[in-house]
Amino acid sequence: MTEKKLTISDLFKGVPLSEPLKAFRGSVEAIVYIAWLSSGDIESRKKEARKVKELATLYKKEVDRDRKAIGEGLKGIRELRTRVKGLKASPGQEKERVEALKERMNKEIKEWEATLARREKIHAKFESLNKMSIARVEKTFVKAENEVIMPMVFVYFVTIWDAFIIDTVRRILRVHPRVITGGDAKTELSRAVLWGAKSIEDIRERLIEEVVRDLDYDRKKLVKYFADYWGIDWKESGVPLDEVVEFRARRDILVHNKGMVNRQYLNMVGERSSLEEGEVAPIDIKYFANCLYKLTELAVYIHKIADAKHYAKADIG
């Protein structure tokens, strides 16, 4: 029996809902709603297109049956007309009846041919409208989902996930500033900064922001600090770090390179990449859902340990 995968809502159960996870959860719920609303509307359009396609298929079968029946009818009348043409009618009323029969058969053949032509024309128009309808859904709605909506919510989500990580760094540093106070490392603060500081807390916040900027720039160092200084090893979360790196790399090329894979992306992702330089990295609903789940799972894991090892102790103390 396979284990049931938790939903996004399930991931937050039993977790202390303090900041910055509280803000992160609110943003995640908003993103899920936007994605669901947009995808739901697009899916309804797809269903409409599928219904039209099904109707078109049934109509084509009906037209094919009519075409076959009319074709067989025309064939029979034409054969009969051929036989009538071969009749040698005697003068008088008999000849008139034969000529009238020929005329009637010619008229009937023309009517059958006209009926067939009308059905063919109607079918061609219906088929054209059907193709236009499906093409419109694929071009307008499916394209909108894959090229606008999903990339938009993906970029927004990874951005708020980054914000959660950086806000976590800030909160931990305020509680356990050993990264700043340990050792004899020096820092430079301008006279203007020192003069403008209203309290020692202002200076501390400035020092915290220096560390934040450094770790935000160097993500490998950030992950190492979480493990070495704060006892939060991302590798133990069950979320592959390779995927986390790829999510952020793809977000970067969407924001800075119109989604086109560049050398920087390939250097970050390495040989694991299935994309080639110059190729546009797709963001479909499946990819976005995987990213949403994995990064939320990692965020919850980080917050659980941070709360137990840092926030809760600070609150007690």
Image (spheres, rainbow, N blue to C red):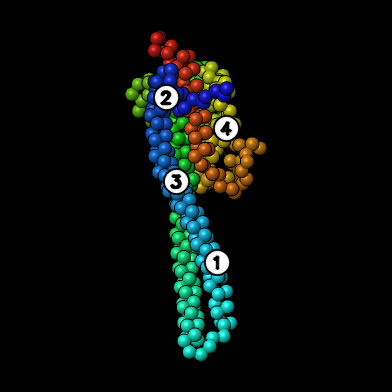
What's the mark number on residue 316?
none
Q: Nearer the viewer, mark 4 or mark 1?
A: 1
101 left or right of 273? left
Tag 1: residue type? Glu
User: What residue is shown with label 2?
Assistant: 21
Q: Residue at x 54, y 35 (%)?
A: 247
Q: Nearer the viewer, residue 16 or 168?
A: 16
Q: Residues within 10 Å of mark 4 (few under 14, many from 20)?
A: some
Q: Residue at x 56, y 26 (%)?
A: 239
User: What residue is shown with label 4?
Assistant: 243
CA distance for labels 4 and 1: 64 Å
Nearest to N terminus: mark 1 or mark 3: 3
Q: Residue at x 49, y 25 (%)?
A: 6
User: What residue is shown with label 1?
Assistant: 72
CA distance for labels 1 and 2: 74 Å
CA distance for labels 4 and 2: 21 Å
x and y percentages locating residue 222 in the rendered image: 53, 26
Q: Nearer the viewer, residue 212 or 109?
A: 109
- Residue 299 versus residue 317 in the image, above or below: below
Nearest to N terminus: mark 4 or mark 1: 1
Residue that lies at the very extreme toward the left in this rendered image: 198
x and y percentages locating residue 87 in the rendered image: 57, 82
Nearest to N terminus: mark 3 or mark 4: 3
User: What residue is shown with label 3?
Assistant: 47
Secondary structure, mark 1, is helix
Asked whether the residues under the numbered discs 4 and 2 touch, taking CB atoms below 8 Å apart as contact, a structural biologist would say: no
Q: Nearer the viewer, residue 151 or 101?
A: 101
Nearest to N terminus: mark 2 or mark 3: 2
Tag 4: residue type? Glu
Nearest to N terminus: mark 4 or mark 2: 2
Q: Nearer the viewer, mark 3 or mark 4?
A: 3
